[in-house]
Image (spheres, rainbow, N blue to C red):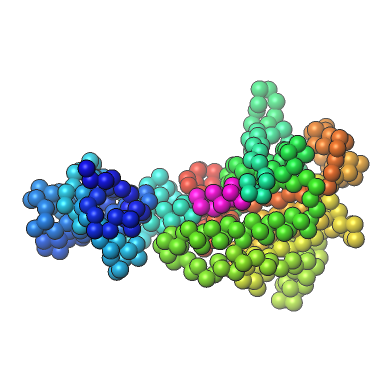
């Protein structure tokens, strides 16, 4: 019996007869030959139907196929050095499943808004295919890295009683007669896990109800947030560097085909996989902006253009460390050498992509944290359970968060972060 394989398995079946389940992405004919561009979810390649090698029925069926027709094929795999995939199949038989006309995404240029409105179909095309495959590799690399480092996966709730970062930009809902909010971050709950298990990471959807109509923001996105007991900030920065180096290395090792589809130069990513990330102080980052003639003063928060300018000066991710306390959340530990700063850091990606990760050493003293909660204008009762972590067995601890889609956008060199998510729901729409 002829073996059923995927397109990605072709390299193991050269000059062998195989079967496949495929969809048609494009077609052209030249007299007695029909060239079919095929996909099956693992890769894209070409099938060739020659009139003198098949029945009249099969040849006529091949000529009549419409875009996104689905069918079975049988044929012999051959190497094809002209193709970036490297293989094609000489088809000997074809069995049609469906063949409808009118597929709305033609093989021509479409605007991004049109494509995102048709995301349920656009995912079948080469570009989103490559992005989603890379997304999957980054997801697996993330889980593998933290498991190898002795972390456990710890799930934070989606509904929350209050805001981890003390903002009002939350999606509100009524929860059995009380107020609840869609999760803004799993961090505070992650700290619970760290004091129970030592090292944990949360990984799930988060929500921000901000009117941020930019190419870098989403209202629904995924966050990966590790928390580590007994760890100071310097150790956390070293862990973050190892993590991001590993993830980038896994993409370079496993996604050459997908990077080629996207036109992403792997050499741009190689420095990130090598580590050696700069620790740039907030003070020095401010000086860089001022030396460039920008109207930026100490104590200001970096906007997207500021981050883009700074990140363009580096060939790999880097840290900006020790931000002013006024522009960061209440739960961070102050720098003993300068109480106007927190022991915190953001990781910025190169090539103008800006912030992709952020973290800090957490304040571990009960009285100090209580004071910072009050100074932030927050309700102490909302954080009573969080304060308990400092009351019973408190230890130095640190953590950080990674914006999953932002990392994908940088690695894939995307113009808009919306391309990094499988299906941009209505709340992620960007109005013109």
Residue at (72% x, 33% y) in the render: 161
Residue at (61% x, 43% y) in the render: 203
Relative to 285, residue 47 above or below? above
Q: Residue 290: image x %, image y %?
A: 75, 73
Question: In the visual, does 356 lie left or right of 43?
Answer: right
Please check the rendered image and state whether residue 206 is part of the magenta-colored stretch, yes or no: no
Residue at (66% x, 38% y) in the render: 154
Tell me where residue 337 sits by quadrant: bottom right
For the record, the magenta segment spans 135-145
Tell me where residue 196 sits by quadrant: top right
Relative to 92, residue 278 above or below? below
Q: Residue 187: image x %, image y %?
A: 71, 43
Question: In the visual, does 328 lie left or right of 123?
Answer: right
Please check the rendered image and state whether residue 140 is part of the magenta-colored stretch, yes or no: yes
Tally the numbered discs: 0
Question: Of helix, strand and loop, which mostly describes the magenta segment?
Answer: helix
Task: Indicate the quadrant containing the N terminus: top left, top right, bottom left or bottom right.
Answer: top left
Q: Residue 50: image x %, image y %?
A: 14, 58
């Amino acid at each position: 019996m002829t073996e059923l394989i995927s397109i990605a398995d072709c390299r193991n079946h050269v000059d062998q007869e195989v079967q496949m389940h495929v969809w048609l992405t494009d077609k052209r004919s030249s007299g007695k030959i029909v060239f079919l561009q095929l996909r099956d979810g693992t890769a894209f390649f070409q099938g060739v139907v020659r009139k003198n090698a098949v029945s009249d029925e099969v040849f006529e069926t091949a000529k009549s196929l419409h875009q996104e027709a689905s069918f079975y094929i049988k044929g012999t795999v051959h190497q094809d050095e002209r193709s970036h995939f490297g293989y094609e199949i000489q088809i000997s038989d074809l069995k049609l499943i469906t063949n409808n006309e009118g597929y709305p995404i033609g093989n021509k240029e479409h605007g991004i808004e049109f494509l995102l409105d048709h995301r349920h179909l656009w995912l079948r095309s080469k570009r989103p295919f490559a992005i989603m495959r890379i997304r999957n590799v980054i997801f697996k690399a993330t889980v593998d890295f933290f498991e190898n480092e002795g972390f456990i996966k710890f799930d934070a709730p989606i509904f929350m009683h209050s805001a981890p970062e003390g903002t009002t930009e939350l999606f509100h809902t009524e929860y059995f007669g009380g107020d609840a909010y869609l999760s803004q971050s799993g961090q505070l709950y992650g700290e619970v896990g760290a004091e129970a298990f030592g090292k944990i990471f949360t990984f799930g959807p988060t929500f921000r109800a901000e009117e941020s109509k930019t190419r870098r923001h989403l209202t629904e996105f995924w966050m990966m947030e590790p928390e580590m007991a007994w760890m100071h900030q310097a150790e956390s920065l070293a862990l973050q560097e190892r993590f991001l180096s590993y993830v980038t290395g896994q993409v370079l090792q496993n996604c050459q085909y997908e990077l080629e589809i996207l036109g992403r130069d792997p050499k741009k990513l190689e420095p990130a996989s090598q580590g050696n990330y700069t620790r740039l102080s907030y003070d020095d980052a401010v000086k860089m902006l001022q030396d460039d003639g920008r109207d930026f003063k100490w104590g200001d928060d970096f906007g997207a253009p500021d981050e883009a300018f700074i990140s363009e000066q580096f060939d790999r991710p880097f840290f900006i460390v020790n931000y002013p306390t006024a522009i960061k959340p209440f739960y961070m530990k102050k720098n003993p050498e300068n109480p106007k700063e927190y022991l915190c850091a953001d990781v910025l990606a190169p090539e103008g992509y800006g912030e992709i990760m952020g973290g800090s050493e957490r304040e571990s003293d009960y009285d100090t944290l209580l004071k910072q909660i009050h100074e932030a204008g927050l309700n102490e009762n909302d954080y009573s359970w969080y304060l308990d972590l400092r009351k019973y067995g408190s230890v130095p601890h640190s953590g950080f968060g990674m914006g999953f889609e932002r990392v994908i956008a940088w690695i894939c060199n995307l113009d808009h972060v919306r391309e990094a998510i499988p299906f941009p729901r209505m709340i992620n729409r960007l109005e013109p």
